[in-house]
Amino acid sequence: MTKALTDTCVRNLAAPAEGNRVLFDSKVAGFGARVTKAGARSFVLNFRTRAGRQRRVTIGSFPAWTVADAREEAAKLRQAVDRGEDPMQNRVELRGAPTVTDLAERYRKVHLPKKRPASAANDESALRKYVLPALGRLKVTDVRRSDVVKLHAKISAKAPIAANRVLALVSTMFNLAVREGLRGDNPTEHVERNPENKRDRYLTA
């Protein structure tokens, strides 16, 4: 059964006795509103891949998503399907994409063993204190220059030199990400470092 979905009809959808039921939209093929036995409502899109596999992707829950917004997103997903893409597979791959926490683990394995104990301890401290709380949950591919600038500025407010050291650490981490094909660029590029006073060193007798 199909009809032009509205917020009102989705709100008034009767919950089934078991499982869930879907009321499909007459404007976008495969787009529908699903209601569960518990009364939870969400928007879905049914589609078939070029390989013939039947898929269902959840767009979002109602009323956080309105019918108009969900229908617009469904239309975009249908366009992707028509291009031969699989939106469900794309979402699975995105969920499995490495985070900055994963990148930090890789950095620990690749770089820390090559460092002097004191330098390795400083890096470990910076990771735990600054980098992971600010960036750890982000996907490696989602980190932007603005995220790095924000982190550097926050540390700079109290410890300008430490901020530069953290920036250098993050730069090395993302150079590793670029080398291993996790992303194509380093978001720390062109982030301005804090000025540091040069110190003259003299040999003793």
Image (tube, helix red, strand yellow):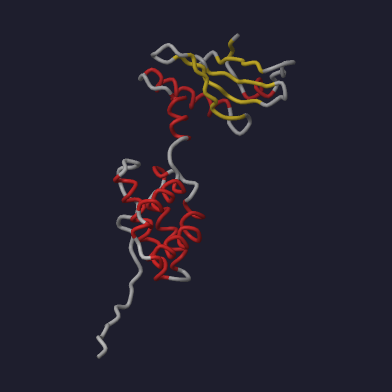
Extreme-top residue of the structure = 1
Which residue does the image show at 25% across and 86% down from the upper left?
203
Which residue does the image show at 45% across and 60% down from the upper left?
124
Q: Residue 199 occupies which quadrant of the picture? A: bottom left
Q: Nearer the viewer, residue 89 or 73?
A: 89
- In this rendering, position of residue 121 left or right of residue 32: left
* Quarter of the figure that contains the N terminus: top right
Q: Nearer the viewer, residue 54 or 179?
A: 179
Residue 126, compared with residue 183, is above or below; it is below
Which residue does the image show at 29% across and 78% down from the upper left?
198
Q: Residue 123 occupies which quadrant of the picture? A: bottom left
- In this rendering, position of residue 35 left or right of residue 96: right
* Quarter of the figure that contains the C terminus: bottom left
- In this rendering, position of residue 21 left or right of residue 189: right
Extreme-right residue of the structure = 17
Q: Nearer the viewer, residue 74 or 177?
A: 177
Residue 132, compared with residue 79, is above or below; it is below
Total marks in image:
0
Q: Position of residue 178 (x, y in %)?
A: 31, 46
Extreme-bottom residue of the structure = 205
Q: Position of residue 135 (x, y in %)?
A: 47, 51
Q: Position of residue 68 (x, y in %)?
A: 54, 26
Q: Position of residue 127 (x, y in %)?
A: 46, 58
